[in-house]
Image: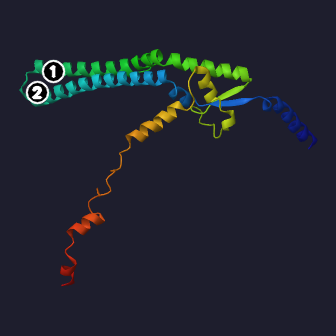
Amino acid sequence: MRKTALILTTLLLLALPVAAQKYACVNTDYVLRSIPDYTSAQKRLDRYVADWQKEISDKMAELDGMRADYDQENYLLPENLKKRRQEEIKAKEQEIRTLQQQRFASGGDLDKKRAELMKPIQDRVYNTIERVAQEKNYAFVFDKAASATLLFANKKYDISDEVLELLGYKPGAAEQQSKDDKTQDKPKKPSNPEMRKPGSDRNNRDILPPMGAMKK
């Protein structure tokens, strides 16, 4: 028992310096969404992706056409032409695979374009987080957006708004703009109270027979 108590006491003493360290959290998704340059870069990247996907889709449509033509005509073709058409189809398939790898594989055009457009902004954010951490003497800063194990974070220790202010942006501006956009997108109710949906009481009154006819 004495040995067990000694071990527990030692562990508690070792844990004291760790417990005294300061911690904070930040939501990098919230910070980045609040930076107009980042949202603009994301839209540009989305346009590149859409163009590349269309490029691949167009080539796949060409391949489908080549296959359909071959299926309809192959019984009429001599062997040398059959072989040539088959080789053309295989070449088109390989062209599409190569293009897919070039655009979307690891280290491909998508990764390069993302690094070009977004990494400089991300670096600014992370450098600012590091600055806040050093000034406030935080030992650790957890990312609420990326950590699957962060189950709870007290708002008091969330430095996201402080990071935004140091970057020169107003905290909460992106969320407010998003709410305003959703409000504008909602369909307006008709201002005329006489405009009722089909099946309403007013429409039913219009088609009912006179009261005298109902008594007969």
Q: Residue furthest right?
A: 2
Picture coordinates of residue 162 (x, y %)? 64, 26
x 55%, y 31%: residue: 30
**Residue carrying label 1:** 85
> Few, some or many C-alpha atoms within 10 Å of disc 1 (few <14, some 14-19, many ≥20)?
some
Q: Is residue 75 left or right of residue 37?
A: left
Amino acid type of the residue that numbered disc 2 sits on in the rendered structure: Asn
Question: Height in image: 4 above or below 83?
Answer: below
What number is the disc on residue 74?
Answer: 2
Q: Which mark is residue 199?
A: none
User: Tag count in the figure?
Assistant: 2
Specify the quadrant of the image occupied by residue 142.
Answer: top right
Give 101 or 172, whichever is nearer the viewer: 172
The quadrant where residue 25 appears: top right
Q: Are marks 1 and 2 in contact (CB under 8 Å)?
A: yes
Quadrant of the frame with the C terminus? bottom left
| Residue appearing at x 53%, y 26% in the figure | 32
Tell me if residue 208 can be seen: yes
Residue under the point 63% across and 22% down: 129
Outermost residue, left direction?
76
Residue type at the position of mark 1: Arg
